[in-house]
Image (spheres, rainbow, N blue to C red):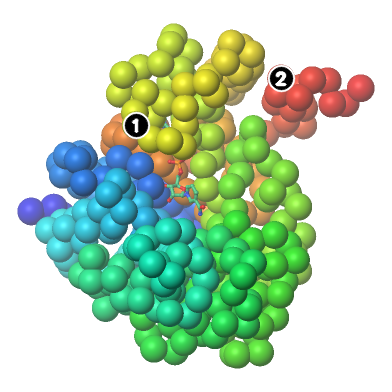
Amino acid sequence: MYQAKENRYSEMVYNRCGHSGLLLSAMSLGLWHNFGSAAPYTNMAEMVTTAFDLGITHFDLANNYGPEPGAAEENMGRILRRELAGYRDELIISTKAGYLMWPGPYGDHGSKKYLIASLDQSLRRMGLDYVDIFYHHRPDPDTPMEETAAALDQIVRSGKALYVGVSNYTPEQTKKMAALLRQLGTPLTVHQPRYNMLDRAFFEELEPTLAEEGIGSVCFCPLAQGLLTNRYLSGIPKDSRAASASPFLQENRITPELIEKVRRLQALAENRGQTLAQMATVWDLRNTLTSVILGASRASQIVENVQALSRRDFTPDELREIDSILYGDVSA
Ligand SMILES: NC(=O)c1ccc[n+]([C@@H]2O[C@H](COP(=O)([O-])OP(=O)(O)OC[C@H]3O[C@@H](n4cnc5c(N)ncnc54)[C@H](OP(=O)(O)O)[C@@H]3O)[C@@H](O)[C@H]2O)c1
């Protein structure tokens, strides 16, 4: 029977999510990969309990995480029942809907019909009465945003989620959703954008809007799915995401040019006394964001990445060198 470490809150940093009362661990754990129907239970449970022992309170899911879609929520449900039964009030569980989940006209996008039915399914899969955060996973240009906002408001009022957020919305879409939700009396608490050294533009354009509106930011793919680690420096390991059946990271992303840059980033990280995964994680956190969502295939990666919190500062020279490695001499 799992017993959480007593000192689990001693090292982690907790940041306020926008202007809300919600504090999130600076690092969250995402269940997008490695929590599918074929994943071994012991490895999944070890990842989740290791994260919790390190002070990670926030676990990020979506209706479609698997494969098969729904499998990650089912597995999280098992872990919540078997390992974390006594800890629900110490956990922030997020889920989302917005991508294709079931056939027919009601299993995708942003209608009230889809969002409410999907959250009901997610709650059943996880065996929960409520989630802490429910996100609209992506903007839907064909559903009036008023309807999506009304669905999010209804979800909070019905007690099925405590907070609501959006993911992948542009600054303009975010402002509109924030205004609609404000009129309804439900704040837009959090946004979930992509952000890492290789892919920064989306969050950087969004950040002023989030600051102005008092919306928290929980950023995904801090390690660019593993590219910003030592994983691919000597080829493509059989047990890596790039070698797996996942369509989201294909081998052709791993070019000699990218690997040369990664090697130089790794040398810089070593000079700082860190691994590249650690440096890339805290590079995200040097910014004003609320939390980064780590992905992992084994518990040791989570341990390594959380240790990065002890070395979060960057000198201006280090930041310039990172930019110069990735984008050429930007200061010239
Ligand atoms: N809202 C959205 O649209 C959206 C989209 C994407 C993701 N997300 C969320 O963000 C979460 C994180 O995404 P992600 O998994 O792509 O995150 P990531 O942190 O960029 O990549 C995680 C992968 O990096 C590798 N890794 C991690 N730590 C390592 C270490 N110390 N040393 C070497 N390799 C290491 C592992 O790859 P291997 O598996 O190869 O070991 C791991 O699976 C997802 O689970 C999901 O919750 C949200």
- Residue 42 position (above or below residue 100): above
Q: Image check: 20 left or right of 301? A: right
Residue 84: where, in percent of width, then height? 20, 60
- Residue 306 position (above or below residue 275): below
Based on the displayed image, in which of its 4 quarters is residue 312 positioned? top right
- Residue 197 position (above or below residue 9): above
Residue 310 can be seen, yes or no:
no
Label 1 amino acid?
A: Ala
Q: Which residue is drawn at 29% across and 71% down?
A: 121
Q: Which mark is residue 245?
A: 1
Residue 168 can be seen, yes or no:
yes
Residue 252: where, in percent of width, then height? 52, 21
* Extreme residue toward the right, this view: 332
Which quarter shows the C terminus? top right
- Residue 279 position (above or below residue 233): below
* Residue identified by numbered label 2: 325
Residue density around tag 1, few if under 14, some if 14–19, many if 20 or more, within 10 Å: few
- Residues 55 and 211: in front is 211
Ligand 1 shown in quarter? top left
Q: Residue at x 29, y 46 (%)?
A: 67
